[in-house]
Image (spheres, helix red, strand yellow):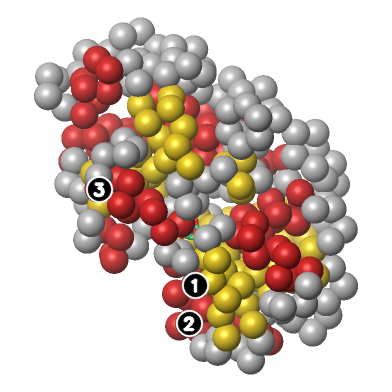
Amino acid sequence: MKIMKKAAVLVAAGALLLTGCSADKGDNEEAGPKPEAVEFEAGTTMAKLQDAGKITVGTKFDQPLFGLKGLDSPEGFDIEIAKIVAAELGLDPEKDIEWVETVSANREPFIENGKVDIVVATYTINDTRKEVISFAGPYYIAGQDLLVLAGTDDVKGIDDVLDKTVCSVTGSTSLENLKTEGVKDTMATETYSNCLEPLRAGKAAAVSTDNVILAGLADQNPGEFEVVENPFTEEPYGIGLKKDDEEFRNFINDTLEKAYDDGRWAKAWENTAGVVLSTPTPPAVERY
Ligand code: GLU
């Protein structure tokens, strides 16, 4: 469902347009048909996952547009990205993915201790995280913003909340960025959806994280909240994997580039986040 788009948010990947419409499910065909069995070199993570016939993916379960789980399998752009990777491994994206909920703070530990094979979860690539895990991507670039109660007219950007209470999430870049920006009173919880009650109750003046997460929360609660639309950081989203698994990292990067070229990435976007946000240009993957 596409309807009128109303306001612009600029991020590095291009201009996003937010609308007030509700997300629908998309057709879930982005990952495409199961490809012919590809031969991977023995001993590689790709060969191991193909032999196992399964990949375990850590993702968010409470973030509309990117990773949201109701009674069925999770849905969203991150979910479709994981399905594209699974399909490229010769797995069935609808049957061979085990979804594990990751919150912001447990993503690195879940990768390090092998609880998940990859994390696709609005996961910003940064040097601190690269000390313990590796990233493929980026496959999208978000920007940190603020969510306020609808009708709030005295918050136009981060400078307007430096002396107020701002809610965010433990283990996220968002919370760290708030401190760097000089926000004096931060409220930390486990998930962004947990910040909505304090915002409703006036215990927090704003919720802060990536604009696309906030857009999803606003879309899920029509008329209640507004994204300020004045992003103050760049958040390149990567796919987390075991540190220094160079072959697997290159494989995922190659997969992303293929998906950019053959339209699977754009289709994944349009059927999920694209219901609310305009289609960005895919960012160049990092080859380090
Ligand atoms: N992208 C930021 C991060 O990885 C904020 C969103 C999140 O916590 O998932 O920390």
Instruction: Identify which residue is drawn at 73% across, 70% down.
Output: 199
Q: Earlier in the sequence, mark 3 or mark 1?
A: 3
Residue type at mark 1 is Leu
Which of the two residues, 62 or 122, is positioned nearer the viewer here? 62
Report the label total. 3
* Percent x, y of residue 87: 41, 20
Which of the two residues, 27 or 114, is positioned nearer the viewer here? 114
Tell me the CA gap for discs 1 and 2.
7 Å
Packing grade of label 3 (10 A; few <14, some 14-19, many >=20) is some
Quarter location, residue 208: bottom right
Packing grade of label 1 (10 A; few <14, some 14-19, many >=20) is many
**In the visual, does 236 lie left or right of 7?**
left
Look at mark 1 in the image and give the residue it sits on: 175
- Whether pointer 1 and pointer 2 mark residues with C-beta atoms closer than 8 Å, the reply is yes
Tell me the CA gap for discs 3 and 1.
22 Å
Instruction: Identify which residue is drawn at 84% across, 53% down.
Output: 222
Above or below — where is 169 with respect to 240? below
Packing grade of label 2 (10 A; few <14, some 14-19, many >=20) is some
Looking at the rendered image, the disc whose residue lies closer to the viewer, 2 or 3, is 3
Quarter location, residue 272: top right
| Pointer 1 residue Cβ closer than 8 Å to ligand 1 | no
**Quick one: SS at disc 1?**
helix
Which of the two residues, 188 or 160, is positioned nearer the viewer here? 188
Number of the label disc, if any, that sits on residue 112: 3
Instruction: Identify which residue is drawn at 69% across, 77% down.
Output: 204
Look at mark 2 in the image and give the residue it sits on: 179
Residue type at mark 3 is Glu
